[in-house]
Image (cartoon, coloured by chain):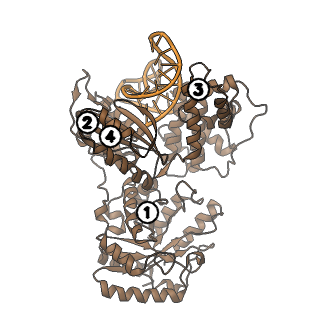
Chain colours: A brown, B orange
Amino acid sequence: MARPPKKPPAPAHDPATLTKNDVARILDDVSVMLEITGANPFRSRAFSNAARVLEELTADLRELVESKELLEVRGIGKSIFGDIQSLFATGSFALYDELRAQVPVGVLEMLRVSGIGPKKVKLIHDTLGVDSVEALERAGREGKLAVLPGFGEKTQLNILRAIARMRKYEDRFLYSEALAAASEIYDAVRAVPGVRRHLLGGSLRRRRETIGDVDILVTAHESEPVMDTFTTLPRVATVVSKGPTRSSVILDTGIHVDLRVVKDEEFAFASHYFTGSKAHNTEVRARAKKLGYKLNEYGLFDAEDRPTACKDEAALFAVLGMDYIPPELREHTGEIEAAAAHALPRLLEEGDVRGVFHCHTTYSDGHATLREMAEAARALGHQYIGTGDHSRTAVYAGGLSIEKVERQREEIARLNEEISPFVIFHGIESDILPDGSLDYPDQVLARFDYVVASIHGQFGLTETQMTKRIVRAMENPFTTMLGHPTGRVLLAREGYPVNIQALIDAAAANDVLLEINAYPNRLDLDWRYMKSAKEDGVMMAINPDAHHTEHIAYFRYGVGVARKGWLERADVLNSRTAAQVRKFLDARKRKKGIA
DNA sequence: GCCGTTTTCGGCCCGACTGTTTTCAGTCG
């Protein structure tokens, strides 16, 4: 690059507090900086692969490095292992320092402007000295971009528009928001005459907790009418591209939507391809190759390039020697091996859920009464609902005094007689106090059907302190479930620092359930940890954390992430009948000696 | 830089679309 900064950058990270996600981000940055500096693209890819691999690890990274077990992980070789080792020791490594000396932070930022990639960024930086998004915008306004080789008026305009869009909109959306926006477009597109099969694909179909863009796939004899409708829908703010097989638009909410039109006989291959994930697809293609096929979005071809017909995805998987892999599992976390060994789990389904726990009422900060919540749950076909109002320390949320707890218990008893066989379980969401104790005396805790213990304050502890605090709460015999285990708020707030594996261990050791908080901006426990929690014998509960009657249906988002976490019916308490839940809770109390 | 029933070198996914070209490079997914 043209002008490296004078002094070498200071270590950018404190090695003591470096997390797995920090390391992944650094490796990603290295990958991007390698691209910009024109290094071997496969070397760059090796770093981004390694970053992805780290993101999917559930064990403690620091321990994996110390025990050298990380070297066994596919995608991490000796060199990158050494870099990570160095990161934990010194907060940096040689290549990282070298690259940061060459590529200013602002240049990395420029890559986030859609439509320009490493080649253009390098050219702009080298010839104009532009080193930030702001400087890029200025250069565009002054017409300096249009005269660069390979650029033109249109490219310049697109860059300026992309910067404006980037400023105006988030680049990711909650699953719930993206689904609402996508459904409207999807409905309009599949209503076009001539459309035969259709699918909402991509990360929505895989039920990721956040969504980058929406992929819609349809089959139609003629693509033009479909594309014309799609690109002129009222919610479409910008048409990014339009062609016979692929068009791309941006909605007024900032969400990107891609539409692909293929022939009917290509549907199986295209739907697999456009569902992803990218990592899953790469693995499946590699498997196809080993079996002597070539797989792409249009078909499966043998050595003589003859196509193999597949009427749907199940047929495609079958040809490749695999059971059908549900979309939620297609994240390259062992699903391909399991499908080949006919060992995929039989995933939890919405219909398996017979009731939910952890619902708020007007006793604390909920907006509906006990009766209204119970009736709403019954209308969903549920057999029971469990409350989970805030405990007394949560004054800001109308936390229940002991006297209010008693009143609620009496009302629940009365209602239970009236609406039987529907059952209301009396639970509480007890704050975990700073020292790890719960928020009521034992004799009060003893009278609840269950206790959800949650952190709501004092987020500023270190990971060790926070882990100790929560584990202590889990060791309390009255704690039935751990509420939103990390406290994250998607797209807004990272979870508090905590050793999740230690929480899983504590859950297994103390027979404590882990909550799958199904509120759409939490989805906490993260699905990435569910498989190992399940393998450790931990049971989970899908809790909507409802504050309105409509929120009870959020359990569906919980089912989505539970499926991503490989959970089966037996792994969640909600699949049990009201009588079975009562029996389970009673047995647990007897075992703990608190009945 | 990573990987290996195509093993220690030589691959590493590849097709669609745009904007700039005048036959293709860059970007994206």
Q: Do the CB atoms of the residues marked 1 and 4 lie less than 8 Å apart?
A: no
Contact flag, marks 1 and 2 (Cβ < 8 Å):
no
Residue tagged 4: A217
Quadrant for residue A595, please give it: bottom left
Q: Residues within 10 Å of mark 1 (few under 14, many from 20)?
A: many
Q: Report, in whole angstroms, how far the alpha carbon at label 1 lies from the one at label 3.
A: 42 Å
Residue sitting at 40 percent across and 41 percent down?
A277
- Mark 4 belongs to which subunit? A
Q: Do marks 3 and 2 both belong to one polypeptide chain? A: yes
Q: CA distance from mark 1 to mark 4?
A: 28 Å
| Nearer to us: label 3 or label 2 | 2
* Letter of the chain that mark 3 sits on in the rendering: A
- Of the residues tagged 1 and 2, which is closer to the observer? 2
The reply, left or right, for residue A151 in relation to residue A363 is: right
Residue matched to label 1: A518
Task: Say which of A444 and A82 sits in front.
Answer: A444
Q: Which residue is mark 3?
A: A120
Q: Quadrant of residue A103?
A: top right
> In the rendered view, would you say A39 is above or below A559?
above
- At mark 2, the secondary structure is strand
Q: Identity of the amino acid at label 1?
A: Ala
